[in-house]
Image: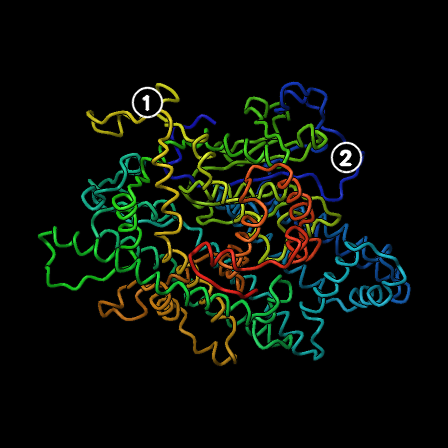
Amino acid sequence: MTTLFRNAFPNFMIDTNITPPVYKPGSCPLFSIPATALGVRPGIVNMKFPQVPASFSTSPAGLLDETARLIEEARSLYAQLVDRISPENATFANTILPLSQSENRLLAARKLFGFYNSTSTSSELREASGRASVLFDAFDSETWMRDDLFRLVSNVVCNQEKENLSAEDAYYLRHKHQNFLRNGLGIAETKQRARFTQVQTLLREKALEAQQCINKSHGLWLSAEELNGFPRSALSTLKKGEAENEGKLWFPLTRAQIARALQFIEKESTRRKIYIANDNRCLENVPRLKEIILLRDESARLLGFPSFMDLSILDKMARSADLIHNYILELRRKLRTAGQRELKGLLELKTNDRSNDPNISSEIDPKLYLWDYNFYKTILTKTRRNFDEELFSEYFPLEQTLAGIMEIYSSLFGLDFVEIPAESYSLLGKDHIMVWHADVSVYSVWNDETQGGDFLGYLYLDLFPRENKYNHAGHYGLVPIDQVSSNTTRFDLLFHEFGHAVHNLVSRVKYAIFHGTSTARDFVEIPSIMLENWWWEPSLIKNLGNHYSYLSDEYLNFWKNSNDANTEQPHRTIDSTLIHNLIQTRHTDGVIGVLKQCHIAEFDIAIHSQKTHHDVELLNLSSKWNQLQKEVTLLSGPEADGEGWDWGHGSARFGLLVRGYEAGYYSYPLGKAYAQDLFKTRFEHDPMSRKTALEFRRVVLEPGGSRNGAELLKEFLERDVSITARFQELGLTTDKHV
């Protein structure tokens, strides 16, 4: 990658093309392109690739045709199974294994096909990708509602003691049986079953529509004056207006751009305009999200559960919904005093700032608004903590930082990352499309020599924003591709996303459904959150940080053009004082940031755990979101100016509520607690301990979702996981376990 300082707004996507979970030597031809042409590290020239890199050459029609073919192939197999095998003769070998092999094939295709919906520049391919996902999901529902298959699986469950199954086989069997029950076959009454099937179909359609709305590009025209304070390097990337918008700039409502705007734009009126525009960019999702919540609640009650939250906990690591809610409430309660203290300090800054503005009356009682927090927090860290975040970021140009992160992961987990040069792509043939966009780079990933030197997979990096690309931090487990998407300027999140990629690359399981990050939702973030800690190690920051202006003449000219003529060029290496000041900001100025996560988690729990279906019908999601936001984060919105609680619709543009984290957003704050327990107990005294990291790889990462997550953490810690470390980190105390 040779992109000029494009880490101003990195929208990055990490993809790992992993070897098939059930791969056996000789089951597919070895890739015959010379290994040196595909990035084999120097000194190792005899390696061969056990799978061809994926080709991103599909068309919308081809994608849908292949989806239909695979579904029909699986449907035919299931028909053969029930015709050939009676329930009393069903065994793990003649029933479950064929089902799992079919599942592996479908999973490989559906994840790759679904990938285009979040990355393709073609609207036709994105639409086809979305339709393919709906078709695969519909076939899932059809399969889970088949009594004939269920009878076969149930008989295997009843007789499993006779089969001497391995622990992973038995776990897979329970997983398969539970899926039949939770997807409708636990409903005895025929009409209710039919309604359940209808509800699932509607849910799939509404969720797809909601996600497509969220992925659409939105923005607004702003004048240069309105954008005062916005970094020059970022300002230069904005599209200039023509005709009626002459003299204005198009401000795209992407996550990274919004974050920088709220952090640096000086005019409160502009920050307010951007914040409110973002919270109102998915108005058509407002009734759609309400319908989704109602359908989820109805499906849970049809299955006999008191709420969707209670249903969702079945496949989670946490033991009960009450324990989850109690943790969030305790965290919020214990942080409230510190949050009020932080709010007071920021309000003092704002008061002084307003008193210097002749256009603002001193009689106005200032409030800290949602669009003020990041702006004054940045001032606080720069003045009182003497930390200049913008200067700090200049020491971490993207390519250099990525190389450093790869080196750290290599050292910890025994891996080698080797870039495949773009000029080698043509060796695969003109019909083989190696990447889905010109910005994408590809790496081959290997165990290093101490771990056997064998091939692990491919790592794809898609690092920059574009229209209609997924506009939020997220991760997609794909077979044979694993995809992680984010929009951020924070490099601790690069450590996080690389953690997801490595989780997939090193995972070794028997069944694809359990591979890598295919774990319980409240487990999947824990390893990656823990790995964020390495960003805060002073020695590692020192090694990674070199000012971009020294990388080349091109970079130096870019720096000169972005600064005043009399500005002195920064030092080549990052100053230790700057690193120290960064470390000081980690926990002293971010309490309200933690409370923001508590707000989303509480909202998610509240809307999915109402006592009756009628209570769900009465919910005003936008008002609930905004009221909880004020109550939990302590920050004001337009309601403080008399505009009511329906001023914005933040829940309607929050993608995680419709695509995987429904009734599960608590996984972030709770995962942070568990992650800090892991780090403090096993890594804090020696973060670069290869021995401990390899044990973490073996015990926690390699099993993927093939074992209960709590068991993996207990084995690594040699005790039950605790939330104590997180409270201690925040300067709080507790003696509770969740």
Label 1: how many residues lie within 10 Å, few (<14), some (14-19) or many (20+)? some
- Asked which quadrant contains residue 57, the reply is top right
- Asked which quadrant contains residue 625, the reply is bottom left
Which mark sits nearer the N-terminus, 1 or 2? 2
Question: Is any atom of residue 386 visible in this view?
Answer: yes
In this view, the residue in front, 546 or 150, is 546
In the image, residue 206 lies at what x, y percent?
51, 63
In this view, the residue in front, 13 or 288, is 13
In this view, the residue in front, 495 or 91, is 495
Q: Is residue 268 left or right of residue 693?
A: left
Quadrant the C terminus occupies? bottom right
For the rendered model, the colour scheme is rainbow
Q: Is residue 706 left or right of residue 79?
A: left
Question: Is any atom of residue 289 visible in this view?
Answer: no
- SS for tag 2? loop
The residue carrying mark 1 is: 556
In the image, residue 598 lies at what x, y percent?
43, 62
Which residue is at 60% across, 67% downward?
313
- SS for tag 1? helix
In the image, residue 516 lies at what x, y percent?
65, 47
The residue carrying mark 2 is: 28
Which residue is at 28% across, 71% downward?
644
